Amino acid sequence: MAYRFVAAVVACGTASLALAQDRAPDGRQYLSQPLVKSIYTADPSAHVFDGKIYVYPSHDVPTETPDDDLGNQYAMHDYRVLRMDKIGAPVTVGPVALDVKQVPWASQQMWAPDAAYKNGTYYLYFPARDKTKDKNGLGKFMVGVATSKSPMGPFKADPKPIAGAFSMDPAVFTDTDGKSYLYFGGIWGGQLQRWKDGKFDPSGSDTDLGKDDQPALTGKVARLNADMKSLAETPHDAVILDEAGKPVLGGDHDKRFFEASWMFKRGGQYYYTYSTGDTHFLNYATGTNPYGPFTYRGHFLLPVQGWTTHHSIIETGGKWWLFYADTQLSGKNHLRNVKVTELNFNADGTIKTIDPLVK
Ligand code: FUB
């Protein structure tokens, strides 16, 4: 199948051009179009602050580093915030909101961030490698926090990572009672498999493979203190149970947690959502509280074009929306673009599965 390309002229300070494909390599059409074409973006964490929609994405950058299972090709070094008045409105791309050079503890790879608001302050949560060296000569992923009086930044980073948090992909959920929770963790390049009892093994495994009959590794969840910058407790396992009430096993790659935690609440149910990584699904599991356990319910996004899949879900304008990313603009795994599409529920609260590529 031949690729068909359309040239998309892009305005971005010093104007740049992006080549957008109008069909995927297998001929299917994209369900939705990139939100911005002037920069590459991924891992969109969307929020409604003061009536406007803000998206906190990773800011993908070109690199010569080849793709590997550690994710070295994801060489991002800063964050830029996207803003829109409502879904479908023009999107403003903010200036640099935080650069790795401004984070005293971090060395590289500013991966998937999230944000929260409380009492006049905006909080940016972000993962990055620290300045230590593991068996691969790379730092360990930790989770940091930075603050600003504006949702667009610039943000000022705390001098140290959040004590007790580790690995990557932070996501903050604030419950209807005002308590906030930090979800985090990701396996393989995110190194979660190397953290046992809160201690990091710099020579530990690079994957979760070879433990098919054991309960899968889980994302982590801990309540945040009122300062929104520190954990109120030792992180808990966000356990996902299968239909029989048993923990999902490590060998079940279609179901098991890989990365990209996102929590939302609807109709009194807690929806824990996540990526399966190497099988490229976005899954959900439901529970009765923010800690779980959560019962596996299924896929809600089928594989996108590109290796990674990472998302957020918000309710605004009376509808639910899924923010996700694919590689439509570049055709390269590490140069992604964020998108949005409506998310629909069945009467019983299950989510209607979305195919991001349509015939
Ligand atoms: O963007 C870098 C990493 O890829 C994210 O942290 C993961 O969730 C995956 O999307």
Image (cartoon, grey):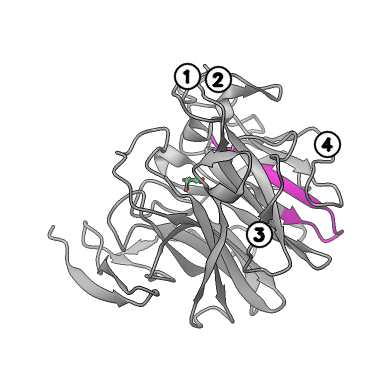
> Looking at the image, which residue is at 49% across and 80% down?
88
Q: Position of residue 176 (x, y in %)?
A: 82, 61
Q: Is residue 174 above or below residue 289?
A: below
Amino acid of disc 3:
Phe
Q: Earlier in the sequence, mark 2 or mark 3?
A: 3
Question: Residue 185 colored magenta?
Answer: yes
> Separation of disc 2 and disc 3 at Cα?
30 Å
Amino acid of disc 2:
Pro
Q: Earlier in the sequence, mark 1 or mark 4?
A: 1
Instruction: Pick the residue in front: 288 or 80.
Output: 80
Of circles 4 and 3, which is in front? 3
Q: Secondary structure at mark 4?
A: loop
Of circles 1 and 4, which is in front? 1
Q: Is mark 4 within 8 Å of ligand 1?
A: no
Question: Residue 63 colored magenta?
Answer: no
**Residue named by callout 3:** 155
In the rendered structure, find residue 233 and report the number of the disc placed on it: 4
Q: Earlier in the sequence, mark 4 or mark 3?
A: 3
Amino acid of disc 4:
Glu
The reply, left or right, for residue 20 in relation to residue 300 is left
Q: Earlier in the sequence, mark 4 or mark 2?
A: 2
Instruction: Pick the residue in front: 15 or 1.
Output: 15
Q: Secondary structure at mark 3?
A: loop
In the rendered structure, find residue 202 and report the number of the disc placed on it: 2
**Residue named by callout 1:** 135
In magenta, the rendered stretch is 173-186
> Separation of disc 2 and disc 1 at Cα?
6 Å
> Separation of disc 4 and disc 3 at Cα?
26 Å
